[in-house]
Image (cartoon, grey):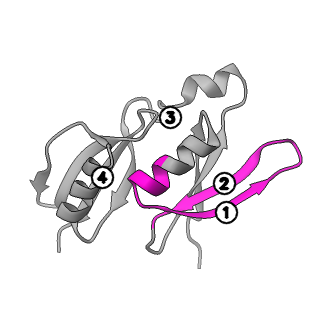
Amino acid sequence: MSHLALVTLVVDDYDEAIRFYTDALGFRLVEDAPRPDGSRWVVVAPDGQGSGLLLARAKGDGQRARVGDQTGGRVGFFLHTDDFARDHARMRAAGVTFLEEPRHEPYGSVAVFQDLYGNRWDLLQPAG
């Protein structure tokens, strides 16, 4: 059996990214370990089962240019919830920027939000 374990997200700063993902989005800090090259192995994940994010500090101009634009302006990340109204309200109260009002589509309740760098995410409660 296989599953997707981690997705790398390039960030400007480890600590500000950890604060955003844990405080504003409610993720848990799974691992924060120093590496010999001075970088850190930082993993955050939602409380449920599934994949996590490897927060990787940008190195060099090419990577720094990608911070906040890793998917060319498209929604690239999908955060599922079992209670859309609860999590939408909690995230708004924590200062998360939503780019639209909640929509109720045949596939579920959804609203696009930005992370602290501008990457676009869907907060989504699947229908059914």
Quarter residue 128 falls in: bottom left
Q: State yes or no: discs 2 and 3 in contact (Cβ < 8 Å).
A: no
Q: State yes or no: discs 1 and 2 in contact (Cβ < 8 Å).
A: yes
Left or right: where 74 falls relative to 51: left
Left or right: where 125 falls relative to 38: left
The type of residue carrying mark 1 is: Glu
Is 29 located above or below residue 10 in the figure? below
Asked whether residue 33 is drawn in magenta, I would say yes
Identify the residue position indicated by label 3 in the image: 70
From mark 1 to mark 2, how far is it between C-alphas? 5 Å
Q: What residue range appears in magenta?
A: 20-46
3 vs 1, front mark: 1
The type of residue carrying mark 3 is: Gln
Identify the residue position indicated by label 2 in the image: 42
Disc number placed over residue 91 in the picture, else none: 4
Quarter residue 65 falls in: top right
Q: Earlier in the sequence, mark 3 or mark 1?
A: 1
What element does badge 3 sit on?
loop
**Residue 3 placed where, x, y %?**
56, 70
Q: State yes or no: discs 4 and 2 in contact (Cβ < 8 Å).
A: no
Is 108 located above or below residue 98 in the figure? below
Left or right: where 52 falls relative to 63: left
2 vs 3, front mark: 2
Q: Earlier in the sequence, mark 1 or mark 4?
A: 1
Identify the residue position indicated by label 1 in the image: 31
Q: Residue furthest bottom?
A: 1
Is 113 located above or below residue 52 in the figure? above
**Residue 103 placed where, x, y %?**
12, 50
The type of residue carrying mark 4 is: Met
- Mark 1, other Cα within 10 Å: few <14 / some 14–19 / many ≥20: few
From mark 1 to mark 4, how far is it between C-alphas? 23 Å
Q: State yes or no: discs 3 and 4 in contact (Cβ < 8 Å).
A: no
